[in-house]
Image (tube, rainbow, N blue to C red):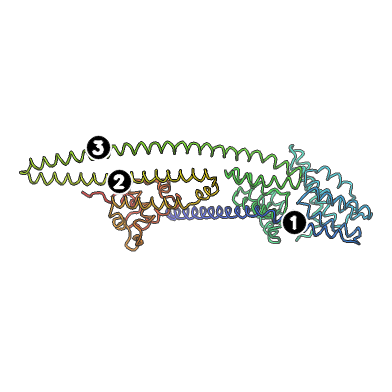
Amino acid sequence: MNRYQRSNFLAFIFFIFFTCSAYASSEIDSLLLRLEQTMNDREVFDLEKNNKIKQLKSLLEKKGNNKDQVYFINDQIIDEYLTYTLDSALHYLNSNIKISKALNSIGLIHQSNIKMADIMASTGRAFEAYDILMKINKLKLNNELLIEYYKALIKVFNEVSFYSTLSDNYLKYYSKVEAYTDSLVPYLNPESDDYLAIQEKKYRDDRHLLECKKINTQRLSKTKIGNRHYSLITFERSLLYQLEENEEMRMKYLILSAISDIQSSVKDNASLTELALILNKRGDVDRAHEYIKFSFADATFFNSELRFKVISEILPVIKEAYELRNEKQRKKLRALLFIISALLILLLISIFFINRQLLTLRQTQKELKKINDQLNALNQDLAESNKKLNHINDQLSESNHVKEHYIGNFLSICSNYIDKMDRMNKIVNKKIANRKVEELFAETKSKKLIDQEVKEFYENFDDTFLHIFPNFVQELNALLLADEQIQLKSEERLNTELRVFALIKLGIIDSSTIAKLLRYSVNTIYNYRVKIKNKAKGDRDSFEQQVTLIGVSKK
């Protein structure tokens, strides 16, 4: 591969990289909007959840239910409350424990106790959960309950090891996780999600991320957004991308997990909290603040001490960043108000001095005309010299006329601006006096006034620029290929592309400055510049330099 080929290959790689980055960023923005819409619809999803629970509770009110039937209905209610509100789940679970004892059913007693231990472990009460499980004789459990028993023990020691501050304790507790996992695996169907989840975690812990991702994709294909299972799998997917340090993809799956949590009314969730932390680090303080408040409200509703504690530690950090950002914005607003006031004073002073300069200029013109008349009378014999002098006088007169024209335009624009400010001030005072604040807010919120001012600015700019450089369009087109020349519409004097290069002709070459003047994004201005340079008849690199020479005398 020669040097030229290597250069092209590297350029291609960079193009692919930036294209993928731009796509990923666009996808994240779209998913964030979808998440926020889902957050706005939280009450709708919660209403569906409450209606489902209400229907189950209505079954309890039917006459003739025996204890077995009540136990079964309670179990379904517990499953609905399990990630929705902890206190209610515990209430119905305690009720089932009493019913199972009344029925003297060892199987139902064990089932209820295992479920109680699972809940205890999930809410930060791992040692209470362990005590419950240790009272169960596992030899009396059928295969289905034995699976749940081992899963509860794994959850207990996962929680204990995760929150262990000493490395020795962590290794001790995590060895228990591995031991109970080894005991569980023989009872699982290799096609079951429990089995696949164990394999995925093993690959993740061993940093075999490709195999881990394949299993996660397999699990994800068996579920859909809007249920707790989907939320867990996508959260685990985000852990993969965290290990790969791929923040964009990590955000994507945290967002999907958070959307699924809200749609399934899961209040005991972690995805939105993690997402808030990432957004806060990236400087998107507004979103981070809204998301952590939302998570805090969910944790309060669910009433889990563990989740409440985790969010309570994060909330002050994001809140402090949010308040600091707001204070900076207030300071910036005050500074801008001061600058605008100062500029207004400078504008009035400038108008005063320009008016004085105009009077002086007119007086000078009168004196020059008088001197020219005297010179014409004294130099009748010097015809050639007289012609040259007349030519110089004509040029000076034309220059003065141009100055008068543009000074007059400037004064007119300034005067109109002051009149508009005065009219706006009167309208604002009148509406405030009449307490029509909402009407005033609606009027000031409208972009119609700004759009009209921008249109008037373009018209003044086009008129002024073409007055100085009447042949600018023709001379610019002369620099372009014959089939790529700019064609104006019948009502146009200049279009956006021509205005960009008109400003370059005036010496304004910085894209950000041009973008501010023409009220476009820097990206758009950069694209216009590249687009026109690509149509150049000659050297693209010297095209803008040639534009600056338009209208310059070739003598």
Between disc 2 and disc 1, the foreground one is 2
**Residue drawn 54% across and 52% down?**
21
122 to 60, vertically: above or below = above
- Measure how far apart labels 2 and 3 are at the Cα level: 16 Å
- Amino acid tagged 1: Lys
Q: Is residue 179 visible?
A: no
Q: Nearer the viewer, residue 530 or 217?
A: 530
Relative horizontal placement of residue 353, taking residue 455 as reference (left or right): left
Q: Are marks 2 and 3 in contact (CB under 8 Å)?
A: no
Q: Name the residue that disc number 3 marks.
A: 360
- Measure how far apart labels 2 and 1 are at the Cα level: 70 Å
Q: Nearer the viewer, residue 52 or 99?
A: 52
Q: Nearer the viewer, residue 68 or 490?
A: 490
Residue 155, horizontal then vertical, whole percent: 78, 48
- Amino acid tagged 3: Thr
Mark found first going from the N terminus, 2 or 3: 3
Q: Name the residue that disc number 2 marks.
A: 406
Residue 512, horizontal then vertical, whole percent: 43, 46
Q: Name the residue that disc number 1 marks.
A: 49
Q: Nearer the viewer, residue 22 or 91?
A: 91
